[in-house]
């Protein structure tokens, strides 16, 4: 009987630790998804300061056939809207298919979609696939590696 009680005690300790881990994972997932949504909102508004605050200090971006940008100033320049731009972003969303969290790193794989509107009213839908490596720095999830391409 004593062995049964000890076994049940150990079982409940293990079970409760899994519950804590599951809760932590849900919380971490929610934080990453909130950052992803904040990125999209800042992108739509053209709020470069907020957008850049979501990147880690030594972030890298890789899009399509372009060279890797691993300088935070080059990343800022990439996202800064051009004054001569005739298109206005009206929506953007990242839709994760898989989000794996391991310690202070996470991999986020999915698709993105958006709509931009030309000054003459024409609309353009765009989308593609992405891979983001998130890194938790000082308690905040930040984009460390951002890769995407267009899906045709």
Image (cartoon, rainbow, N blue to C red):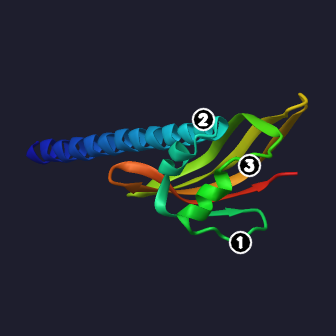
Q: Decide: few, some or many residues near mark 3? Use Cα within 10 Å; few <14, some 14-19, many ≥20.
A: few
Judge whether residue 82 can be spotted in this image.
Answer: yes
Q: Is residue 13 left or right of residue 1?
A: right
**Kind of element beneath mark 1:** loop
Which image quarter holds the N terminus? top left
* Mark closer to the chain start, 3 or 1: 1
How far from the left and from the top, in percent, is residue 48?
57, 46
Assess whether mark 1 and mark 2 are in contact (beta carbons under 8 angstroms). no
**Kind of element beneath mark 2:** helix
**Number of numbered labels in the structure image:** 3
Nearer the viewer's eye, disc 2 or disc 3?
3
**Kind of element beneath mark 3:** loop
For the point 58% across and 39% down, the residue is 42
Q: Closest to the observer: 134 or 101?
A: 134
Assess whether mark 3 and mark 2 are in contact (beta carbons under 8 angstroms). no
How far from the left and from the top, in percent, is residue 134?
50, 55
How far from the left and from the top, in percent, is residue 27?
39, 39
The residue carrying mark 2 is: 41
User: Distance from label 2 to label 3 (Cα)?
Assistant: 18 Å
For the point 52% across and 40% down, the residue is 33
The residue carrying mark 3 is: 82
Q: Decide: few, some or many residues near mark 1? Use Cα within 10 Å; few <14, some 14-19, many ≥20.
A: few
Q: Closest to the observer: 80 or 55?
A: 80
The residue carrying mark 1 is: 67
Judge whether residue 60 can be spotted in this image.
Answer: no
User: Distance from label 3 to label 1 (Cα)?
Assistant: 20 Å
Please, which residue is most extreme toward the top here?
121
Quadrant in the rendering for residue 121: top right
Q: Decide: few, some or many residues near mark 2? Use Cα within 10 Å; few <14, some 14-19, many ≥20.
A: some
How far from the left and from the top, in percent, is residue 35?
50, 42
């Amino acid at each position: 009987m004593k062995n049964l009680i000890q076994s049940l005690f150990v079982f409940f300790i293990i079970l409760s630790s899994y519950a804590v881990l599951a809760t932590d994972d849900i919380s971490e997932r929610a934080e990453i998804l909130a950052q992803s949504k904040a990125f999209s909102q800042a992108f739509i508004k053209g709020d470069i300061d907020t957008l850049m605050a979501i990147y880690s200090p030594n972030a890298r971006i890789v899009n399509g056939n372009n060279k890797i940008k691993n300088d935070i100033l080059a990343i800022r320049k990439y996202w800064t809207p051009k004054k001569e731009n005739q298109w206005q972003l009206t929506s953007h969303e990242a839709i994760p298919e898989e989000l794996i969290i391991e310690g202070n790193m996470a991999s986020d794989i999915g698709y993105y979609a958006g709509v931009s509107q030309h000054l003459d009213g024409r609309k353009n839908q765009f989308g593609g696939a992405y891979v983001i490596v998130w890194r938790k720095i000082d308690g905040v999830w930040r984009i460390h590696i951002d890769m995407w391409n267009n899906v045709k």
